[in-house]
Amino acid sequence: MKIDKKYETGVYWQDVQHGQMIDFYKQVLSRPSIARDPAMFSYSIGFLVMYADQHFKLEEAYMEKYNYPDTDTHTRHHREFIRELKAFKKKYTSYSDEAVSVLESKVGAWIKTHILENDQKLGAYLIRRQKEELLKS
C-alpha cells in the first residue's frame, strides 16, 4: 500500500499501517457492494475501528519505549478518535449518504490533523532516538 509522500513519517511500519488504513477507508467509501449489504458496511466500520486501535497500541508502545515527551496528548487523541469511530458505528448501522459524509469528514479530518501533524512529529522523534540507540551500540 503506497501512500502519498506527504503522509510518510519515515518509520516503515507506521507508513505501511497508515497506507493500509487510508486504502481501507477509501474502499469503504467507494465500494458499491457495501451499499447493498448493510452487514458488510457494519463489518467494514468495525474492522476500521479494530485496525485503528491496534495501530494506536503499537504507536503507544513505541512512545513508551522511547520516552516520547508528548505521549499523554498523543494517546488522548487516539482514545478520542476510537470513541468517535465507535459512536459512528453505533449510530450508522447501514450504508447511507449521510453515513458516508460523516465518515469522510471524521476520517478525513483525522488524516489531515493527526497523521500530517502528530504522527510526523512522532516519526521524526522515533527515527532520531533509534539512530541514537544505534550509535551507542
Image (spheres, rainbow, N blue to C red):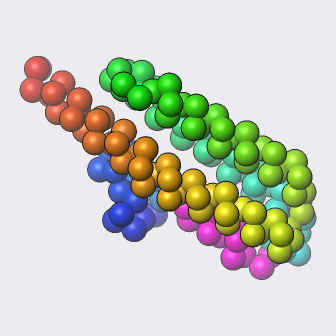
Q: Quadrant of residue 109?
A: bottom right
Does residue 119 appear in this view? Answer: yes
Locate residue 2 relative to residue 124 in the image: left or right.
Answer: right
Residue 58 visible? The answer is no
Membership of 107 in magenta stretch: no
Left or right relative to 96: residue 123: left
Q: Residue at x 76, y 69 (%)?
A: 100
Outermost residue to the bottom: 32
Above/below status of 50 relative to 34 = above
Of 30 and 114, nearer the camera is 114
Image quarter hosting the C terminus: top left
Start and end of the magenta stretch?
A: 21-33
Q: Is 106 left, or right, of 56 in this rendering?
A: right
Q: Who is closer to the viewer here, 6 or 27?
A: 6
Query: Residue placed at 21% from the left, 35% from the top?
Result: 128
41 with respect to 19 (left or right): right
Indicate whether residue 29 is drawn in magenta: yes
Position of residue 85 measured from the top left corner of the image (x, y, whole percent): 73, 48
Frontmost residue, 49 versus 39: 49
Tell me residue 106's x, y (percent): 67, 57
Residue in the picture at 45% in, 27% down: 71
Numbered-mark total = 0
Asked where in the image residue 99 lies, by quadrant, the reply is bottom right
Splitting the image into 4 quarters, where does residue 54 fall?
top right
Q: Residue 95: x and y, percent?
A: 85, 68
Q: Position of residue 5 (x, y in %)?
A: 34, 65
Main SS of residues in magenta: helix
Relative to 101, residue 71 above or below: above
